[in-house]
Image (tube, rainbow, N blue to C red):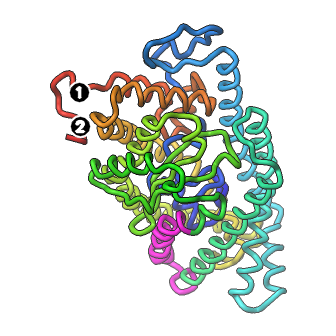
Amino acid sequence: MKRYLLTLGVGLLVLCGCLVRWQRLGGASSGGKFNLAEPRQTSPSAHPGALIPEINPPQQTSTSQYTLSYDRYLKAVAYSRAGYTLYFVSFFLVALCLFLILQCGIAAKLREAAEKFSDKKWVQGIVFVPLLFLLVDLADLPVSIYWHSLSLRYEQSVQQWGSWSLDWMKGEILQIGFGILLVMILFAVMRWSPRRWWIYFWIPAVIVLLGIVLISPLVIDPWFNTFEPLSKDHQSLVSSIEKLTRRGGDPVPPDRMFLMLASKKTNAINAYVTGLGSSKRVVIWDTTIQKISEEETLYIVGHELGHYVLGHVKTGLLIGSVGIFLALFLLHRLLHLCLDRWSGQWRISSQEDWASVAILLLLLHGLLFVADPIVNGFSRAQEHAADVYGLEVIHGLIPNSNEVAAHAFQRLGELDLSDPNPPAIVTFWLYSHPPLAERLVFVHNYDPWSKGEQPKYVK
């Protein structure tokens, strides 16, 4: 699904930062992937050596900072900053589209078309919601197409346009399906309790949050990618991961370890832990196995395991639930302010009018934009804690674990074209992970054991 899921419930989940596990077209991940799909992970201003492009960088005996060749440096800057620009372009395009849909009476015309089609409310919703969502998504489609063309040009993606188009259509089907379900529930609750609908709708919104986290690994993810048992061709890695998860106190059995055939679509590397309860699983991309060592892969798994052991998933669900409640309250108040001011101009009679969905989407779109730096700041803190945990859990199991972790970040930056020097405002607003070089330098230098200190998480 797309980053801007223009469904009320799913959008609220994004607002609360609990659905970052969908890639730009995503799926719901409970733990958060090791690397970042939007925006690119980057390196810091705190280490000047990482910011100076070197045509012939000196050979290093250890990976103490993030460095790129001159050619790779130029590509990383151009690719990453194009992504930043497209984020803001996409926001303003969608906002403008929704505003024009209201201002030009298009939402009212769509409502009238739905009412002419049937007198039954549920049929009207099935007609109205897909028309509105498709209209908005088509406005944002040029940005998505251009981003994919850039990914192909910079050799980040290998997915051909036919496959990409199919994934886009799958995302639309999921989005519209969730949208119809949630809007129908929302309007039923509005009709039942016009003044307190935002309180009562909170319960199904939270249920949707939990449901997506549970079913995504089993239903949504396999619809976009191919998975096979990791033990099929990588038994030694399975044994190492099993040992690692046991040491972390959160064992994952081998039958819940999977290989994702990511190389069909991307050159990027990744691994993640996802799901809850019976749907929980470890997923390794085949590109990761192809391009980095087994020890480096284990550090990535350790990082992801940290999100579970440190309670980030439960905390995220709890804070997400509170965030949904607050977001619904704001939407309730702002919706009535808009209706009081523009209902006549927009030809929207009340909050129960199907056309009011367009107002809710516009308000939600703005709330998502404003909430991004808050959500991302919280996420960066959790990702740093997971970096610490990942390093501690592999210490003693893997020789020279600091160098292994640092080199994993170096390879990640090289392969994913991580920006060598992101603007501070971009890091603040867009980054759900700390800049890559900050992470590299941290794991290279973190060593409580040699100082006689207690590690923070894994004693």
Q: Judge left or right: residue 333 versus residue 130.
A: left
Residue type at tag 1: Pro
Residue drawn 73% across the image and 34% down it: 155
Find disc 1 in the rendering and name its residue: 448
Asked if marks 2 and 1 touch (Cβ < 8 Å), the reply is yes
Q: Residues within 10 Å of mark 1 (few under 14, many from 20)?
A: few
* Image position of 124 with respect to 142: above or below: below
Assign a secondary structure to mark 1. Answer: loop
273 or 106: nearer the viewer: 273
Residue type at tag 2: Lys
* Image position of 404 with respect to 175: above or below: above
Query: For residue 456, which numbered disc appears in the image?
Result: 2
- Distance, label 2 to label 1, CA atoms, is 9 Å
> Residue 449: image x %, image y %?
21, 27
Q: Quadrant of residue 453?
A: top left
Q: Which residues are magenta?
A: 190-218
